[in-house]
Image (cartoon, rainbow, N blue to C red):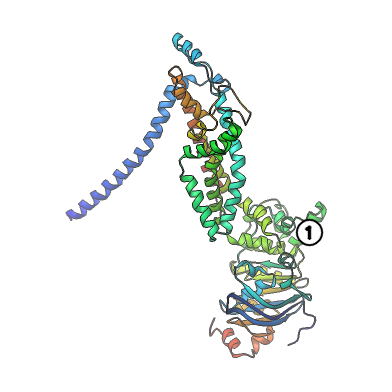
């Protein structure tokens, strides 16, 4: 499979938490722009580590070592200041984590506030409205923008977190099992939202949920013990996987 | 069956004994408050808060005519206020920053040593801390002063603020820090704009408890602030404080009645601070 004009290129990426033991083992892959790429695999296969490496959040752990290249629009992010990288690659986490002391409004523009960027009021208003509309939350919260974000339901909080990431206009949106803490209805809304968002954003999503990957992703990666076993169009991988281990995983024989 | 009955009686007895002892522990507090109110309420009037401590002569004349002792403890109240505020200004920023360091780098050798030493300070006799402040401030300046008293009090506040900051920050979920960093924010701005505001309730409680802890301190002030018969706002001059006044009243037979009213005032002040701190801690508890 060849991806033309990839927005993101992983070249021989290896990551280790303890010397001599790679959590991610020379992974190479091109990621398509404005598509959803899912990363699947059993627990501990390195999928979250790989995703976190793309905005260098994996470096929060001590003694981490990363080799290879990760090119975002041709720029090696492993050689770029992490603060800059994280503004280009937004991240949404497993559990919704809005800032508890900030209002909904401030949560959306938190990226600007925390980075000390002050915008004119009109621009902020527009940004908040646009970001909340992007995640389908505007109609639900437009009358309570200045209330704390923590009073929203779990699904709404997660959409608020997506809006917060989107407000910085990232080139790629990284999602680390964004629906695993949500109920099926909220999960469904987020999935619809992602299909909508891919018109504008490139999305990479780590998921435990195979049917979720099948429903929403265009491309899928299957990782096992730190290795990228298979990477293909989702449809092809789910109907006709080329590696035996992928087939075993997808048919529930391990994982 | 008789053994079952015996065991039931044993259980009940145990329960009532613990209940009895639990109620016994609060008896001293109520006994103290009752005693202070009984003996002190007469002295508490407007002048009590606005006038300085009376001279022994005035007090003796009043006693002879059967009047209440004139004057109040305004010099003590203002002195306590001055020194506690000054001590808080010194101790709060240092305490919070040290607490941040300890919670951010919990396992380094440096943190272990710092934590150990702050515990030692907390366990140090307050009179020793007073002696240190005497050597550091009183000697070089050449005079007893509010500043020296504040330094002594701030040293006593430090460990309380450090540990409460550390404990509160540790309770915050790690996802909060991740959320901030993932937006490209610097480490400093995540701490100052995300973690500290989220920990505000805990920090504030710790600060209030630290203040109420040092407000009643007498020993370190004897060697540093010394005392003053008039209201003083100059931080390099000797200054009075409520607990210092209580000590002075104790040493003057003519002023002995003032002990009760001053003690009542100090106790109520400190109890209120404690109650407020507890309420804030409850209200701001981290979800």
With B70 as the anchor, is B190 left or right in this view?
right
Viewer-proximal residue among B114 and A246: B114
* Residue B157 higher or lower than A78, as above or below: above
Residue underneath mark 1: A127
Q: Determine the residue positioned at 49% across, 53% down.
A: B116
Q: Quadrant of the C terminus of chain A?
A: bottom right
* Residue B116 higher or lower than A82, as above or below: above
Q: Report whether residue A37 is seen.
A: yes
* Residue A164 higher or lower than B87, as above or below: below
Q: Chain of mark 1?
A: A
Place of residue A119 in the rendered image (x, y in percent of width and height, measured from the top left)? 80, 54
Label 1 neighbour load within 10 Å: few <14, some 14-19, many 20+: many
Place of residue B10 in the rendered image (x, y in percent of width and height, measured from the top left)? 24, 49
Q: Determine the residue positioned at 50% across, 26% down.
A: B245
With A139 as the anchor, is B152 left or right in this view?
left
Place of residue B107 in the rendered image (x, y in percent of width and height, measured from the top left)? 53, 61
Q: Determine the residue positioned at 59% across, 55% down.
A: B101
Q: Quadrant of the N terminus of chain A?
A: bottom right
Furthest-top residue in this view? B65
Place of residue B209 in the rendered image (x, y in percent of width and height, measured from the top left)? 52, 41
> How many numbered marks does the figure carry?
1
Q: Which of the 4 image quarters holds residue A128? A: bottom right
Q: Secondary structure at mark 1?
A: helix
Q: Determine the residue positioned at 76% across, 84% down.
A: A3
With B170 as the anchor, is A50 left or right in this view?
right
Furthest-left residue in this view? B2
Q: Report whether residue A196 is seen.
A: no
Viewer-proximal residue among A249 and B212: B212
């Amino acid at each position: 499979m060849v991806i033309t004009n990839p927005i993101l290129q992983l070249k021989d990426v290896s990551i280790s938490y303890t010397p001599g033991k790679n959590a991610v083992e020379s992974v190479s892959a091109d990621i398509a722009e404005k598509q959803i790429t899912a990363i699947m695999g059993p627990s501990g296969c390195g999928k979250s580590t790989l995703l976190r490496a793309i905005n260098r959040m994996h470096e929060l752990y001590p003694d981490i070592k990363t080799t290879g290249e990760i090119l975002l629009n041709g720029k090696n992010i492993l050689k770029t200041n992490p603060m800059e990288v994280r503004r280009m690659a937004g991240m949404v986490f497993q559990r919704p984590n809005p800032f508890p002391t900030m209002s909904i409004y401030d949560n959306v523009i938190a990226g600007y506030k925390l980075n000390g960027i002050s915008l004119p009021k009109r621009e902020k208003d527009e940004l908040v409205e646009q970001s909340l509309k992007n995640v389908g939350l505007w109609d639900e919260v437009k009358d309570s923008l200045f209330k704390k974000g923590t009073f929203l339901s779990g699904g709404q909080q997660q959409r608020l977190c997506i809006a917060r990431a989107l407000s910085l206009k990232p080139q790629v949106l990284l999602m680390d099992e964004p629906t695993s803490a949500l109920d099926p209805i909220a999960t469904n809304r987020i999935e619809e939202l992602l299909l909508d968002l891919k018109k504008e954003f490139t999305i990479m999503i780590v998921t435990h949920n195979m049917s979720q990957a099948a429903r929403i992703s265009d491309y899928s990666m299957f990782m096992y013990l730190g290795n990228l076993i298979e990477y293909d169009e989702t449809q092809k991988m789910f109907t006709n996987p080329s590696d035996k281990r992928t087939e075993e995983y997808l048919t529930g024989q391990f994982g | 069956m008789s053994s079952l009955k015996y065991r039931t009686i044993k259980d009940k007895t145990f329960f009532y004994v613990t209940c009895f002892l639990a109620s016994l522990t609060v008896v001293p507090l109520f006994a103290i408050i009752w005693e202070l109110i009984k003996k002190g309420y007469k002295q508490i009037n407007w002048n009590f808060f606005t006038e300085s401590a009376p001279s022994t002569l005035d007090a003796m004349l009043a006693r002879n005519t059967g009047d209440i002792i004139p004057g109040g403890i305004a010099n003590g109240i203002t002195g306590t206020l001055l020194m506690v505020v000054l001590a808080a200004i010194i101790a709060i920023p240092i305490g919070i920053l040290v607490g941040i360091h300890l919670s951010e780098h919990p396992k380094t050798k440096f943190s272990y040593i710092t934590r150990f030493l702050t515990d030692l300070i907390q366990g140090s006799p307050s009179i020793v801390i007073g002696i240190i402040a005497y050597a550091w401030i009183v000697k070089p300046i050449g005079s007893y002063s509010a500043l020296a008293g504040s330094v002594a009090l701030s040293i006593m506040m430090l460990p309380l603020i450090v540990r409460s900051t550390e404990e509160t920050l540790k309770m915050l979920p790690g996802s909060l820090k991740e959320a901030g960093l993932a937006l490209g924010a610097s480490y400093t701005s995540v701490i100052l704009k995300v973690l500290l505001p989220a920990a505000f309730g805990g920090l504030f409680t710790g600060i209030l408890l630290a203040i109420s802890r040092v407000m009643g301190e007498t020993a370190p002030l004897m060697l540093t602030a010394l005392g003053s018969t008039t209201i003083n706002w100059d931080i390099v001059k000797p200054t009075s404080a409520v607990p210092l006044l209580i000590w002075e009243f104790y040493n003057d037979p003519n002023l002995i009645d003032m002990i009760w009213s001053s003690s009542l005032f100090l106790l109520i002040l400190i109890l209120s601070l404690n109650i407020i701190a507890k309420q804030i801690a409850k209200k701001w508890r981290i979800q």
